[in-house]
Image (tube, rainbow, N blue to C red):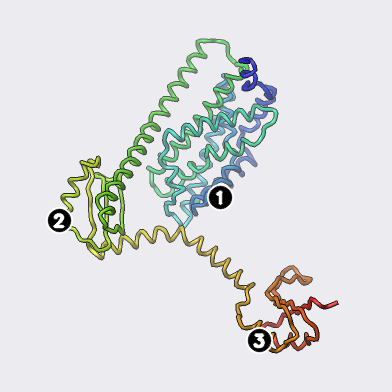
Amino acid sequence: MIRNIFNFINLHNGEEKKDKVLENVVSNISFRGSNLWILACAIIIASIGLNVNSTAVIIGAMLISPLMGPIVGAGFALGTYNFSLLKKSFKNLLIATFVSLTVSAIYFYVSPFKDVQSELLARTAPNIYDVLIAFFGGLVGVIAITRVEKGNPIPGVAIATALMPPLCTAGFGLATFNFSYFFGAFYLYTINCFFICIATFFVVKFLQYPSSIIDNKYEKRIRYGISILIIVMIVPSFYLAYNLYKEKKFTKTAEQFVQKEFENNGYTVIYKKINYNSSPKTIDLAFLNKKFTDSEITSFNKMLVDNGLTDTKLSIRQNDTDIKSEILNEINKFDNNISEKDIAISKLRQELDSYKVTDSTLIQEIKILYPAIGDISYGKIEQYPRTDSARLQFTLFYSGKDVDRDQLTQWLQKRIHEKNIRIISSNAE
């Protein structure tokens, strides 16, 4: 029974020949010619995606990117202690990184749009979850590479590990001289590269790929070095994850405080802004018609500590001008996100309107003038003459006999101001 379970989960089942896997890995390391052009194009696509806040475009760029090659190559080199391959992998990874940073920095420097969008912000503060995604994504990737049947995981790994967006965000930081964005995004890129490499190392060792060295002491030193690097990379991410946890906890507590002390007492909050990163932390509120005295505001500030909100200041905006300006600022932030949808909706409405005939009295007039007509259906349909383009044609279907179609056509042309009209009788033979 136990043997069957181990056989069921055995990674050696369906494994490709080791020399063939190594050959494929080595062939994907180099960044020359077409690979370099593909990388540059993928960087521009990802930069545009970050610029316009389009997730679909960013995903497309991640699928195009050939960045995984040298990272997986470095993992195989570490796992087999092949230092010439390791040197080649690092060299090509540095080339790819330099080219990517340069191309993205140039794009963002030239681009007139330098607004910080949510997709870009998401790559500036990595944490332990990014470490886990990179590690398990790397595991999936290298397991797929070592199979005879590669399957579908490789595109998914490219999306999950997200090497391109952090590099482009780092390029944005360089172009705008925002070095906090640069270091945050480049740290995320380094995490992804390192833990994909480490995941590859573990799988290579587990599958017992042949080693290039025999000295056990030298092998132990390499393992110790990798262990130290893992700790060095993980510790900052734990710190950032802890900060994220504290920020989420503070925000939730502040929301509960506002609800308990104000909303539950019937005060309508029209503006609310919670800032964790300021010193002291702040909660800014504005109300529809309630005005608080200075002593009441002081009393609410004293309640903050009792509710677990230490080092926090509550501000209530009661100046009409300030409230209006803050609300307008918040509205303007949403305008950029809404504008693309508005344009798309407007185009769809225009296209729909071109097919509609909105005259509600037309059928009644036709039946009065032509009493022999029974059922009527009409609308605009696309007509494809012997040209490259289509045109809309008003088409009327009717049932009934003894109707002068030429006369009906002329009347309709005058009535609805359409020259291109076609009339079809369901009784026509």
What's the residue type where badge 1 is placed?
Val
Q: Provide residue 200's location: percent of width, then percent of height.
A: 56, 26
Residue 90 position, x and y percent, is 54, 30
Residue 113's spot in the image, x, y percent? 46, 56
Q: Is residue 152 something that shows in the picture?
A: yes
Q: Earlier in the sequence, mark 3 or mark 1?
A: 1
Q: Nearer the viewer, mark 2 or mark 1?
A: 2
Q: Which residue is mark 2?
A: 294
Amino acid type for the residue under numbered disc 2: Asp
Quarter of the picture containing the N terminus is top right
Mark 2 or 3 closer to N-term?
2
Cα gap from disc 2 to disc 1, whole angstroms: 51 Å
390 vs 115, left or right, is: right
Helix, strand or loop at label 1? It is helix
Q: Which mark is residue 365?
A: 3
| Res 243 → quadrant | top left
Residue at image x 61%, y 28%?
143
Q: Which residue matches tag 1?
A: 57
